[in-house]
Amino acid sequence: MMDKFLITENASIGQKQYWHEDDEGNVTIQTVQDISAIVEANKRAYNQVDEKANWKGEVHQIGSIPLSIFYNLRDQGILGDQKRMKAWLNDPANQVFRTRPGKV
């Protein structure tokens, strides 16, 4: 049997952390985040951009990534690697985190 305890909660970003301990005393800290609000906001922003809009200028918001995924990308070394980050952003599986169509 594994004991599970809520150790932190950040309601403003929908994130909770749980302490799990198994019968052998092994501990795991689990972070979960409800990302539905971020995904819905991203969809609205994405759908408001004209697909024919150009990429002129220096700064464009292209996405919004929940903190739990941000830290996961950092831990995998993707966040600090421009080529891998672009590939991640361009991957259709991650489109829910994009706020703008087109290729990065």
Image (cartoon, rainbow, N blue to C red):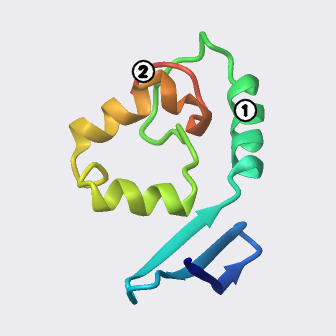
> Image point 24% across, 43% down: which residue?
82
* Left or right placement of residue 90 versus residue 33 in this view: left
User: Which residue is rendered at x = 65% and y = 74% of the image?
Assistant: 16
Which mark is first along the chain, 2 or 1? 1
Q: Which mark is residue 103?
A: 2
Residue, disc 1: 43
Q: Nearer the viewer, residue 71 or 25?
A: 25
Residue 38, percent across and down?
A: 70, 49
The type of residue carrying mark 2 is Lys
Work out whether residue 52 or residue 35 is closer to the camera in this orientation and state it: 35
Query: Quick one: quadrant of the N terminus?
Result: bottom right
Which mark is on residue 22? none
Helix or strand or loop: what does disc 2 sit on?
A: loop
Quadrant containing the C terminus is top left
Which quarter of the figure has residue 49? top right
Q: Secondary structure at mark 1?
A: helix
Q: Is residue 38 above or below residue 19?
A: above
For the residue carrying disc 2, how many other residues have a C-alpha within 10 Å: few (<14), some (14-19), or many (20+)?
few
Q: For the residue marked with disc 1, what is the amino acid?
A: Lys
